[in-house]
Image (spheres, grey):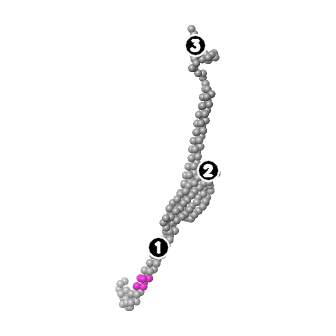
């Protein structure tokens, strides 16, 4: 008796020996399901890549806006830029970026509220960025005025004291007559 191999029926084109046996290959349902999963994963991954690149561009623009705003504020604090309102002035190195400055009085006489705003208007909202920085700064003019008042008060006091010293010394020398000159000579 001759034994047949299990897959011999395929070679001859006969029916499989058992009902539960499957033929090799994918059904149409499996192909459609695999394609749907693949397309869904591709869409999800492309969305993740898009979000990542958008966030990268935005963070780079925000970092540059922050750097430009802080440097312009430091220029105002150092006195390189006058503490006066400025509106939409482009930067020298990149005209796409512009800066504005508002200066208002603070809660105390010697303080100023300075606000610097840096913006970049791009062709799309993705290419636009901005940053705003507020800081209290001591008013340099207040210190100049205070120093001038102090110098004027010191000068007035010095002139008053020299006037009173010369009037008291001239009064004592004129009252003593010739004896005063001898006393003055003896005290030297």
Magenta run includes residue 133: no
3 vs 2, front mark = 2
What quarter of the picture does the C terminus occupy?
bottom left
SS under mark 2? helix
Q: CA distance from mark 3 to mark 1?
A: 120 Å
Relative to 181, 107 lies left or right: right
Q: Quadrant of residue 15?
A: top right
Residue interval drawn in magenta: 163-168
Identify residue for label 2.
125
Residue that appears at 63% across and 16% down = 14
Quarter where residue 5 is shown: top right
Q: Quadrant of the N terminus?
A: top right
Task: Tell me the tag on residue 4.
Answer: 3
- The label nearer to you, 3 versus 1, is 3
Sooner in the amino-acid sequence: mark 3 or mark 1: 3
- Estimate the x, y position of residue 19 in percent, counting from the top left: 58, 18
Give me the residue at 59% from left, 62% from top. Answer: 86
Looking at the image, which residue is at 58% across and 44% down?
Answer: 51
Q: Secondary structure at mark 3?
A: loop
Label 3 close to label 1 by CB (< 8 Å): no
- Distance (Cα) linking label 1 and label 2: 54 Å
Identify which residue, 177 or 45, lies in the foreground.
45
Q: Position of residue 142 (x, y in %)?
A: 50, 68
User: How many residues crowd mark 2 within 10 Å: few (<14), some (14–19), many (20+)?
Assistant: few
The picture places residue 88, in percent across and down from the top left corner, at: 61, 59
Q: Position of residue 94 (x, y in %)?
A: 61, 55
**Up/down of 57 relative to 15, above or below:** below
Prevailing secondary structure class for the magenta stretch in the rendered image: helix
Q: Quadrant of residue 28?
A: top right
Q: Is residue 78 left or right of residue 124?
A: left
Q: CA distance from mark 3 to mark 2?
A: 73 Å
The residue under label 1 is: 150
């Amino acid at each position: 008796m001759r034994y047949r191999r299990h897959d011999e029926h395929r070679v001859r084109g006969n029916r499989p020996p058992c009902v539960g046996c499957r033929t090799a290959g994918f059904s149409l349902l499996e192909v459609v399901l695999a394609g749907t999963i693949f397309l869904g994963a591709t869409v999800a991954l492309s969305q993740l890549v898009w979000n990542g690149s958008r966030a990268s561009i935005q963070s780079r623009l925000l970092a540059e806006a922050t750097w430009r705003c802080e440097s312009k504020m430091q220029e105002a604090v150092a006195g390189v830029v006058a503490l006066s309102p400025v509106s939409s002035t482009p930067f020298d190195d990149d005209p796409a970026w512009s800066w504005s400055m508002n200066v208002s009085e603070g809660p105390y006489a010697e303080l100023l509220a300075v606000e610097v705003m840096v913006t970049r208007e791009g062709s799309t909202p993705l290419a636009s960025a901005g940053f705003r920085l507020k800081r209290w700064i001591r008013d340099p003019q207040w210190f100049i005025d205070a120093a001038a008042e102090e110098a004027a008060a010191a000068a007035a006091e010095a002139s008053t004291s020299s006037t009173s010293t010369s009037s008291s010394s001239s009064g004592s020398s004129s009252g003593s007559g010739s004896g005063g000159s001898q006393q003055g000579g003896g005290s030297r």
